[in-house]
Amino acid sequence: MEKYDLSVTIPFFNEEKTVKPLVEILVKEFSKTKINYEILLVNNGSKDGTENEIKKLVNDRIKLVTVENNQGYGFGILNGFKASKGKYLGYIDGDLENLPSDVIKVYNKVISNNVHIGKGLRDVRSANFIRNIASISYDLCFSLLYFKFIKQLNAKPKIISKDFYDKTNLESKDWFIDTEILLKALKNNHKIIVENTSYDIKPQYKSNVRVSSVWEFFMNLVRFRFK
């Protein structure tokens, strides 16, 4: 039985500096609402002080999920989902590139439209040129392979219903988890709600997205298409 309205998973991989500020902002935003929430902070195989920073914040609503060995971004998300007790499950990155308040924006739109899936749509003016080109390339390749167009496949936050999660065998351990969710939503004829969000780059914090992630994404697109 679901205990919360919304469970938010945040994976951290060697991001000890972002744990406290991110969580403090998110808790402050939730305090302005009537949403019954929990936050799952995933130490996704970090080798720095990430887990210690998370432990300082743990309480009735903030939970620690430990992944001993990093197996990818998606693996961290899936471990957070597995421990979640909410009617809806959401996630954002742990690098402070997403505004934490956007989780609530996307959740509210999902609820008001009574759908199973919601995602963010970034303001491209706030993202750098290279990232925008990569995002457009992802979207075009997706369209060519699947004959569907979804803008900014990897944009977050993403919110899914617990019902969708229970009926969908999500398996991607890497960055493809974003696209897998959308593919399976389309396969099951679910409407995907989109909400405008911000892209708040913090130059003092280092993102874990790498060039290898781009190649990984393309290979997964092909693999899923001909699976």
Image (tube, rainbow, N blue to C red):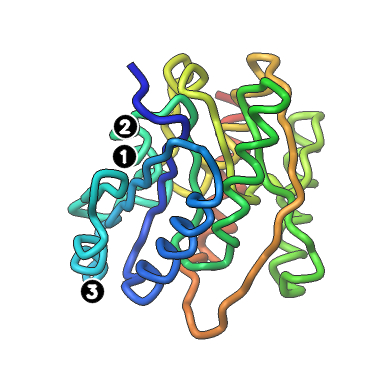
Q: Quadrant of residue 33?
A: top right
* Residue for point 44% across, 43% down: 8
The spot of residue 51 in percent (x, y) is: 21, 63
Q: Are marks 1 and 3 in contact (CB under 8 Å)?
A: no
Relative height, residue 94 to residue 147 (above, below): below
Amino acid type at circle 2 is Lys
Residue that carries the numbered disc 1 in the rendered image: 79
The spot of residue 47 in percent (x, y) is: 22, 70
- Taking depth in this image into account, of 199 and 114 the one nearest to the observer is 114
Amino acid type at circle 3 is Asp
Residue that carries the numbered disc 2 in the rendered image: 82
Q: Are marks 3 and 2 in contact (CB under 8 Å)?
A: no
- Taking depth in this image into account, of 141 and 33 the one nearest to the observer is 33
* Residue for point 34% across, 63% down: 13
The disc, 3 or 2, on the residue closer to the chain's N-terminal end is 3
Q: Is 105 left, or right, of 167 in this rendering?
A: right
Q: Quadrant of residue 94?
A: bottom left
- Taking depth in this image into account, of 36 and 133 the one nearest to the observer is 36
Relative height, residue 112 to residue 107 (above, below): above
The disc, 1 or 3, on the residue closer to the chain's N-terminal end is 3
Q: Are marks 2 and 1 in contact (CB under 8 Å)?
A: yes
Helix, strand or loop under label 3:
loop
Helix, strand or loop under label 1:
helix
Q: Is 7 left, or right, of 99 in this rendering?
A: left
The spot of residue 11 in percent (x, y) is: 38, 54
Residue that carries the numbered disc 3 in the rendered image: 48
Q: Residues within 10 Å of mark 2 (few under 14, many from 20)?
A: few
* Residue for point 59% across, 45% down: 104
Amino acid type at circle 1 is Asn
